[in-house]
Amino acid sequence: MPPAFPLFVEVKRMTSTLVIGAGVIGAAIALDLQKRGRQVTLVDRAAVGMGASFGNMASIAVTEFMPASRPSVWRQIPGWLLDPEGPISVRPAYMPRLIPWFWRFLMASRPAKLRALESQGAAICERALGDTLALLRELGAEDEITETGCLSLYQNKAEFTADRDHIEILERFGFDHQVLGHSELQALEPEIDPKIGMAVLFPDNRSMKDPHRFVTRIADRFVALGGTIVAGDVVGFDVVDRITGVHMANGRALHADEVVLCAGAHTARLAEFLHEPIPLETERGYHTQIMAPGISLAHSIIWPARAFMVTPTAGGIRIGGTVEMAGLDAAPNWGRAKITVRRAKEALPNLKVEETNEWMGHRPALPDTVPILSASAKTPGVFYATGHGHLGLTNAATTAKLMGQLIAGERPEIDLHPYRINRF
């Protein structure tokens, strides 16, 4: 007799997942989910990596997790706002919209709350460098990250003392750092002005040589594994008990069993379609890329008292560090970029400002500084990964791993309850 075969063979359908936002966070999440066997489509209104992932300061800044709401920061905010060249600028017409956000910001400054936020930020950042290096190895791109760290500059003992709470937080969580005297600093970076009396070296704060190239390499790997990239603007969602798809501005509809919202500062608008408002603002950041700086640096540098950062990249030297609160739609104020260049020249007197490009982009800022890494509290099948502020590049690889574990129904490496969407 011929062998008996079943009349029907059950074919298990792959889970269809849409990842909305093709910056470094979205690209890394899409790749992680693709490796987990999902059928993943990466969607963005622009080309891959052309938002904040293009213009960030190229830093894997593992030591910068401390809440911006700590008293040593917020007590200076009134003075900064009154200074036209201060590190924070708020457009007057936008101020009324910021009142609820600033109220939550102040509520995040209570001592017990600060300690919890510090722990939550540290839990992600202590994994960030290792996860980033692992991702780079997978991409065959180990040479895209520097071996040297970041120098935090202090002109004198008073400036160092003013930043002491930052150092104390790092000591509490065991982050590596080294205090350098004048001669040690000059030996490491002779281009730094001799008036800078001391520094702190953060050896694990590495720099990406080209952060946009890093994102595109992640996306290339994602496509090579069978992923799809779709260009277009999401303007709505289909929900029938759970998420079933999205609508695009061009009239196209995309089916989805799951949707991950990680569109940076634009995520708040998407969440509104799902009736799930989140207090997400944009900290508009500016940088100046100098292709012919006339100097070379081995380390990135920050000067807390002058509120700027300088990073050596594959395309020259990048200078940034200012914050502007003006929403998603206001025109750029390029004077903000010029402020940080002038201040950078105080630390680097031989710096030449030749062959330059200026850039402005949107960093997604939550009032408590901690990102949202969460399933939706309202719509099954929807997940959020947003609000990384200045640490999108830093935390991208770790975020992808944690979100992959969450979405796949595994136990994430850290408890994600503190990062839930409905904590506000």
Image: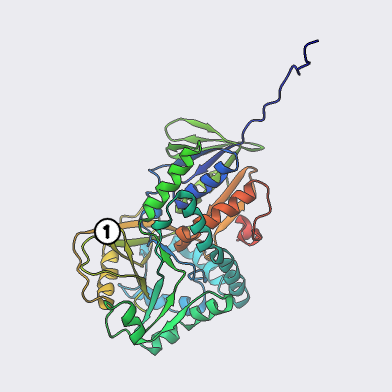
Q: Residue furthest top?
A: 1
| Place of residue 258 in the rendered image (x, y in percent of width and height, measured from the top left) | 60, 40
Q: Nearer the viewer, residue 397 or 158?
A: 397
| Place of residue 84 in the rendered image (x, y in percent of width and height, measured from the top left) | 30, 72
Q: Amino acid at mark 1?
A: Glu
Q: How is the image coloured?
A: rainbow
Residue 94 is at least partly visible in this image: no
| Place of residue 78 in the rendered image (x, y in percent of width and height, measured from the top left) | 41, 76
Q: Residue furthest bottom?
A: 157
| Quadrant position of the C terminus in the picture | bottom right
Crowding around mark 1 (Cα neighbors within 10 Å: few <14, some 14 to 19, many 20+) is: some
Secondary structure under tag 1 reads: strand
Residue 179 is at least partly visible in this image: yes
Image check: 72 left or right of 291?
right
Q: Nearer the viewer, residue 325 or 156?
A: 156
Image check: 82 left or right of 369?
left
Name the residue at 53% across, 61% down.
130
| Quadrant position of the N terminus in the picture | top right
Tell me how many marks there are: 1
Query: 225 above or below 301?
Result: above
| Place of residue 168 in the rendered image (x, y in percent of width and height, measured from the top left) | 53, 81
Q: Residue furthest right?
A: 1
Name the residue at 41% across, 66% down.
147
Image check: 1 left or right of 349?
right
Name the residue at 22% across, 71% down.
351
- Res 326 → quadrant: bottom left
Q: Residue furthest front?
A: 1
- Res 198 → quadrant: bottom left
Q: Which residue is mark 1?
A: 358
